[in-house]
Image (tube, coloured by chain):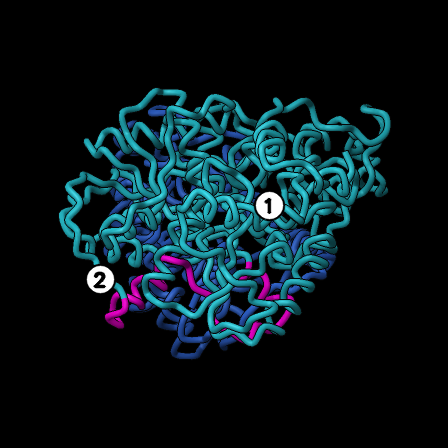
Amino acid sequence: MDNENKDTMNETEVRQESAASAPEAAPAPAAQSAGSAQGPAPKLPIEKLSARQLLELDACTRCGECSNWCPAYDQDGREPLTPRGRATQFRDIIRRQYGAFSAESFLGRLLGKKQVTSQELSDFAKDLYACSTCMQCHFVCPVAIDTVELWERIRECIVDTGFGPLPTQQDLVLKTKNYDNPWGQPRSSRARWGKVAKKKKRINEVPKDISKDKAEVLYFVGCTASYDTNVEEVGINTVNIFEEAGVDYGILGNKEKCCGSVLLRMGDAASFKRICTENIEQFNALGIKTLVTSCAGCLKTIKEDYARHGKLNFEIKHTLEYVIDLIKAGRLKLTQPLNMKVTYHDPCHLGRHAGIFDAPRELLALIPGIEFVEMERNRENSRCCGAGGGLKSGYPDMQNQISQKRVADALATGATELVSACPFCYQGLQIGIQAMDAPIKMRDITELVCMAMGLAPATHDDTQDTDE
Amino acid sequence: MEETRMYLYFEATAALYTATVIAVLLCFAGIFTTLALWRKGKAKSLHHKLNSAAVARSFITDVVFQAQILKISFVRWLMHFCIFIGFMGLLAQTSLMAFISHFTSPGSFLAQSFFHGGGARVLDVWGDVFGLTMLFGLAIAIIRRYVVKAKQLETITKDTTSLVLLTAIGLTGFLCEAFRLMDPQYADVAWYSFAGMALSQLLQSAGITSANYIVWVWVHAVISFIFIALIPSSKAWHIFVSPIEIVLDASERA
């Protein structure tokens, strides 16, 4: 279906298609193979890595601490899936392609070194993409190897040689490139959530278009909260909070583009650079003071990855950080006690990647009546929900199992509410809750803020979810 | 007549020098080819300016004292710290002996002290303390890997080779010491090498009294040379490479 036709679909059709085209819908087939499987594989463009990253492969002590924590290995149990296994495999591949004893060298031939085959590279790609880039391995690594950055660069090499991403993940990348969102939805329906919410009286006003009417704050909604009806309350609650506090804000509406996180995590660096450059240009031209986003992935990407490609002339905050600022400034009051037992899931991109661990706990502590309980694995050691890094689209069953583990962590606390601060984690954890039929309610942190403000929160009715 | 230089308790021969040079050359060749491979990486290694305070702090806490491993497990920290400190101590001892032997005159204070006087006694104690420390750490490593079979460990040839070589270096070092101390000329000072002396007495009580000290020196040296030659392609390489990554990461996140 072409873009134009999609743009003419009615709201119901768009939303139904949203569910049908969700990237996690298809199972993961085998990775594609470039050329004959047993023939020699093309040389990996290792110049894309840094000297430090090549050193990191040698710095791995093979202690295996990463395997104790890796969520993918926890499900699959195959050594090549561990960060140690991936580093060992890649080191072996590049040594056989470029080392002094490479298969092509005199010494290599003398010692009977074998060339890297396409099949080997294809198998390696499958293991490489079975990773949610949660960064847990970096935090437990005694050598502090910058694993996620390493995996992303290696994925870049794999993409360049035609062995990645996996077929189910390619769809995600293509849609992001073609539609500026991984859901493959038309650009013209990106801001539809606001119009629908207004029509249903869930918000008072449709957020203003910041490109037409200047504002201090840009609320960057993100693809998931914009297009997925199951998570739209994240945007709705944020808008209601901003309205109540009198924040001078606006959204980009249909001009908002994906932050490009999907492309970067998948190894499509060229497409990421294109989208990142366009976004930086667009953001800087707005003359905003602050960009606020409710998505942990967008926050990490814009705050950290964009900074490597250009200068941003504004500060970047997660919604919960901004809400704390509003409370401290006396612009928001949380007065309604919520009699709930709550536990908090640290999104990987917000916690381990961006270092925001205290702010969500501070915000929860400001909400009256909440009994907050930590899960056994929290903060730096928070268990990933499995949704990131392309794992959900490449290996949906594995993601489901990982999510269930995290939900089990939450249930063990006795909490009735599982709170997070990322639409993608929200989606990912919902999968586990539904699979287990778990007696726990998934909530975005903005929902609790709305409730504590005495506003009617937009909330998601789990019982209506049938398409997962 | 062949010119020789005195090491601690034996004279270095041309054959020993030749073997040393071969081992060191192989080691350097390995380092050179590895560096050449690293240099193929063209992307930016650091995204921020090097933070020397963070580097220094991390070097002390995470490289020297290995706090990161201690946070995970005391036993693993003890194992790794003992191997690391033991290895470094023995490396320092050998380096000091080589330096004094080659860069000071035989009549100098240093040479006299370390080959004939109080310095030699210090080295006796030093070698035993660090040798035992390393062997203690290696014993824990071997038990974890091959007896307890810790779940997280996945053993490949490289892991075994390094453990075998290091253990052999430690054990043959003590055997050298034990056989040397069987010579009555060391009777008065033998107790400085407390572990070597104990082993010496044990061997003598088992009827082993006539082993050739120099032969054991050679066995010890050859194993050490193999270890040195293999450093860049073995697990031992991490001793030199991992600290670089640890301090660079600390700098980037500072």
Residue type for callout 1: Trp
**Total numbered badges shown on the rendered structure:** 2
Chain A shade in the render: cyan
* Residue A305 within the magenta-colored segment of the rendering: yes
Residue A15 in the image, given as x and y percentages of width and height: 57, 34
User: In this picture, is A53 found above or below B107?
Assistant: above
Q: Earlier in the sequence, mark 1 or mark 2?
A: 1
In the rendered image, is residue B200 in sight?
A: no
Residue A32 in the image, given as x and y percentages of width and height: 75, 28
Look at mark 1 in the image and give the residue it sits on.
A151
* Residue A272 within the magenta-colored segment of the rendering: no
Residue A436 in the image, given as x and y percentages of width and height: 36, 20
Chain B shade in the render: blue
Query: Distance from label 1 to label 2 (Cα)?
Result: 44 Å
In the rendered image, is residue A468 in sight?
A: yes
**Tag in front: 1 or 2:** 2
Chain ID for label 1? Answer: A
Look at mark 2 in the image and give the residue it sits on.
A333
Residue type for callout 2: Lys
User: In this picture, is A349 found above or below A342?
Assistant: below
